[in-house]
Image (spheres, rainbow, N blue to C red):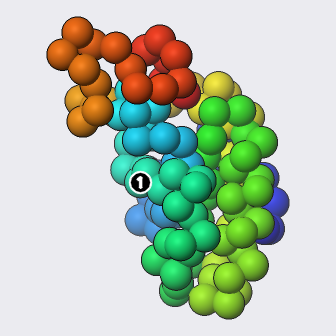
Amino acid sequence: MDDEIDPAEVESLLDGADAPRVVDIRSPDAFARGHIPGSENVPFAELSDRVADFEGEERIVTVCPHGKASVQAARLIGSYEGTADARVESMRGGLEAWEGPLDERESETETEIGTEADEGPNAPF
């Protein structure tokens, strides 16, 4: 892991030509309730099996609810041989600190009455 990055900087980078690959490590249901536009969902439990997916990337930013687990995720990604040349950062403060827009999509695991499978009521994280 290279460092932590402020949410405002992530937002400005996303508007540029060289946007980082943003990896949201929350559960699919939490991701569905709200995520950074353009980010991808790779739940933390799956990260070690999917770390090769990041091979050859130039810049990767990991995201979680509060910026703690994403540090661990960034360290894991950064330790992979295929990301040795990548800049790997954790977003400081997590989604709690994010002030930009959030995308939402319908969760595939919500029940017909709208209850969530995990992580509490309709919070985006």
| Image side of residue 87 versus residue 32, left or right | right
Q: Quick one: label 1, few (<14), some, or many (20+) residues within 10 Å? A: some
Q: Amino acid at mark 1?
A: Glu
| Image side of residue 120 versus residue 71, left or right | left
Q: Is residue 77 above or below residue 84?
A: above
Q: Position of residue 44 (x, y in %)?
A: 59, 53
- Say which residue label 1 marks: 40
Q: Position of residue 48 (x, y in %)?
A: 60, 70
Q: Residue at x 54, y 42 (%)?
A: 26
As rendered, which of 79 and 2 lies closer to the eye?
79
Q: Is residue 60 above or below residue 119?
A: below
* Residue furthest left in the image: 112
Label 1: which secondary element: strand
Total numbered circles: 1
As rendered, which of 83 and 46 lies closer to the eye?
46
Q: Is residue 120 above or below residue 44?
A: above
- Residue 115 in view: yes
- Indicate the quadrant containing the C terminus: top left, top right, bottom left or bottom right: top right
* Residue furthest bottom in the image: 81
Name which quarter of the figure residue 102 lies in. Answer: top left
Q: Position of residue 34 (x, y in %)?
A: 41, 29
Q: Residue at x 76, y 56 (%)?
A: 72
